[in-house]
Image (cartoon, helix red, strand yellow):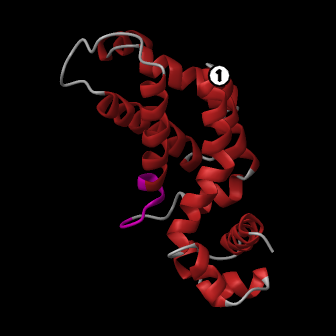
Amino acid sequence: MQKKDVEGLLAESFKELALEKPIEKITIKEITDRAGVIRVTFYNHFQDKYELIEWIIRKEVMEPVEILWSNQMMDEALTFLFTTILHNKEFYMHASRVSGQNSFEDVVRKCFAEGITEYLKANARGRQKHPWLTQERAGEFCSMALAYVLLSWIRSGMHEPPEEMVEIYRFMTTHSMMDLTEEV
């Protein structure tokens, strides 16, 4: 079996278990038993189940989103992101409850920050206007805003359609706090 097949098998096993019990209570043995592999196989691919969550986010969400970003398809990328999360609603609702060290929020922000920062570096058009405002800081700021909107949406039950969430994110990130006093 190829590496990506094993990783996908472990991810599917984990996602199924997450629908049955809290993620914090899922053991590596349960993941590997359901996947039909031995425990050592898990550790050949992942350090722990939190690294597996990160892998799932990177594979399911970030890799396709980054392809769209690289083709300047920003709205499509964000729509894909929200749609993917919605299609796996139950898993992501459970995953969003993981808090503390290795929190889902931290993993999401990290993945978003890396992707957005890479986008900014690849598409920089001019000189840096403000020395403090680096591509890394801008990437982190955008990732925090996107993670906030995404997690708030997940935790509120994902009732709004993905396209509306893209519109909300775009609105919130293109308007100042003073503008928002007029709109909210």
Q: Quadrant of the C terminus?
A: top left
Q: Which quadrant holds residue 143?
A: top left
Residue found at the far front of this picture:
2
Q: Is residue 158 magenta?
A: no
Q: Is residue 102 above or below residue 74?
A: below
Q: Is residue 18 above or below residue 79?
A: below
- Asked whether, in this view, residue 179 is left or right of residue 93, the answer is left
Number of marks:
1
Q: Position of residue 168 (x, y in %)?
A: 54, 23
Residue position for label 1: 71
Q: Quadrant of the N terminus?
A: bottom right
Q: Which quadrant holds residue 74?
A: top right
Q: Is residue 184 visible?
A: no
- Asked whether, in this view, residue 121 is left or right of residue 95, the answer is left
At a point 78% along the width and 67% down the height, the residue shown is: 5
Three-letter code for the amino acid on which mark 1 is drawn: Asn
At a point 49% along the width and 28% down the height, the residue shown is: 119
Question: Mark 1 packing: few (<14 Cα in 10 Å), some, or many (20+)?
Answer: few
Q: Position of residue 71 (x, y in %)?
A: 65, 22
Q: Is residue 130 visible?
A: yes
- Asked whether, in this view, residue 9 is left or right of residue 133, the answer is right
Q: Position of residue 166 (x, y in %)?
A: 60, 25
Q: Secondary structure at mark 1?
A: loop
Q: Is residue 83 above or below residue 155?
A: above
At a point 77% along the width and 69% down the height, the residue shown is: 2
Q: Position of residue 176 (x, y in %)?
A: 33, 14
Q: Nearer the viewer, residue 54 or 181?
A: 54
Q: Which residues are the magenta region?
A: 100-106
Q: Which quadrant holds residue 133?
A: top left
At a point 60% along the width and 43% down the height, the residue shown is: 62
